[in-house]
Amino acid sequence: MHATTHLNEVLIFLIAAVCVVPLFRWARSSSVLGYLAAGVLVGPSALALVKDPDSVQLLGEFGVIFLLFAIGLELSVERLKVMRRLVFGLGASQVTLTAVLVGIVAFWAGQSVEAALVIGFGLALSSTAFVIQMLIERGELASRFGRTSFAVLLFQDLAIIPLLALLPLLSGPDANILEALGLAALKAVGVVIAAIVIGRRILRPIYRVIAASRLQELFVAATLLVVLGSGWLMALGGISMALGAFLAGLLLAETEYRHQVDADIRPFKGLLLGLFFMAVGMAIDIQQLLQDWRIVAICLIALLLVKSVVTTLLCLLWKLPADVAVRAGTLLSQAGEFGFVLFGGAMIQGLLDRETGQVLLAVIALSMAVTPAMGWAGGRLSRGLAPKPSSGQESLKHEVESVSDHVIIAGFGRVGQTVARVLSACGVPYVALDLDHGRVTHYRGRGLPLYYGDATRVDVLEAAGVEHARAAVITVDRSAEASRAVEALHSRMPELPIFVRSHDLRHAQALEQVGAVAVVPETVEASLQLGGILLSSVGIGADDVTRVMRDFRADNYARLEDLDAKNAAGTAQK
């Protein structure tokens, strides 16, 4: 009977999630807010369908474990090395200064030193999931303010490690603040060092054997074993299971299997984390919040203002343009989903009283809800601050000096914009060049990394960071300009992969002769796409269609070139 009761409660949670969360996604809001709303709806302060949130609390805690694993999976050492100036400089300053200011206010309002410390750091963190999703959907992740925001979020994700270790240390009977901070920092450093030292030596060989078996279920089972096993080992050593999961993610981030692992754990992470947020929603007391709405409103407005101002001023201190500083500041003004984890744990361990915890949970949820409005306001404010496009190489060089391992796009017409969206969706930075002054002004106003410049000039390419680029894409319309751009790039950086669009096969051959590694003829590729759709519509199987398209693309459209040559010969004989 007891098991049936728990099953009924879990079913209620799942039904509420399936019904409520899609409504929030339809309204272009965060799924986190949807899960919170679903938890409030079925909880004791609303419909009271589930009276005890502890019934799914264990599953929710596993959601936090998978969340930390996914964060570790994204934090490769190479990525941190490339962005180290913004991550460990700007990011560390933002978290520290915001935490100190918020903590002082909390202490002044009557909280203990330990509680003020937890409140300060908990509200200093922003929503990685919310902000990154917004940047990807709007194609702004590769913009300068998008990269700046991403760097700050990277450090905030790293800060989760010592914060998790800090909670049990602060809740002890003889807690010492400095000692607790030192131990938390040591644990964090130990986790990172362990990941770097043993990651490639142990996990890569194990996954290589598993991948060779070609059993998908075995791969998934191995990933679950790594996540839960590392958490269990850490728990035996007196460290949080979530920290163990983070370590496992950091280990796998150094292997070539990280993308497959991420795809395998995504359903588990999403569902279990959703249950955690629903449990948090159940714990929110609507009646108490209605009584304290003035306090919640004041705290919300103060948080948004403080974080916006602090982040903006720090960005200016780091010599970022004013428009970038304003957009990054407003975009990172909310509190994050990890605040739910931190404050929930603090309430359980007695660091925060229930009333304060309720107010803080409401502030986090509301600050996330208004993030789109804050992003819109930041965009409006930054338009008047954006610098005018300039052809000066020194100006371009100064603006892209923090970019590395990027893609250079020459030409920002329809094709160039499509390439930029694809790169941005995958988090790959780019620098685009175009000679259309109106186009540059328009997209610069939207925060995209588009600059006025001639891609056929070596000095412009150097200013765009060609020496640190990973590839170049030429999408200009005119054949002669495309050829000159390829020649300039190839002469300056012979090893740089250059990808070009061409009008036909003859132009493609000419581009390959001057240094392009891959050329896509527009007319031919469009014809192949049309032919593939036609084959599918007349009943040809998907595998056969894929094979035919692959054969025609093999050897750089060689079969199509033969046909073109035969047609030309036949015409000459006539």
Image (cartoon, rainbow, N blue to C red):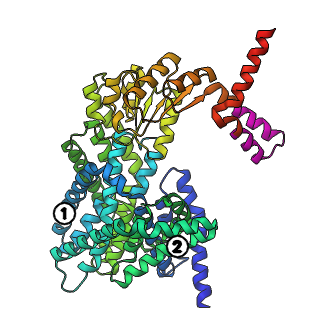
Residue in the picture at 34% in, 31% down:
464
Residue in the picture at 34% in, 61% down:
157
The numbered mark, 2 or 1, whose residue comes first in the sequence reads 1
Q: Position of residue 550 (x, y in %)?
A: 69, 40
- The amino acid beneath tag 2 is Leu
Does 343 sit left or right of 478 as displayed?
left
- The amino acid beneath tag 1 is Val
Quadrant where the image shows the N terminus: bottom right
Q: Which residues are magenta?
A: 528-550
Tally of numbered discs: 2
Residue 224 - label: 2
Q: Position of residue 228 (x, y in %)?
A: 47, 76
Q: In terms of depth relative to the viewer, which is nearer, 438 or 418?
A: 418
Q: Position of residue 138 (x, y in %)?
A: 46, 42
What secondary structure predominates along the stretch shown in magenta?
A: helix
Circle 2 SS class: helix
Does 553 sit left or right of 284 as displayed?
right
Q: In terms of depth relative to the viewer, which is nearer, 205 or 93?
A: 205
Residue 289 in view, yes or no: no
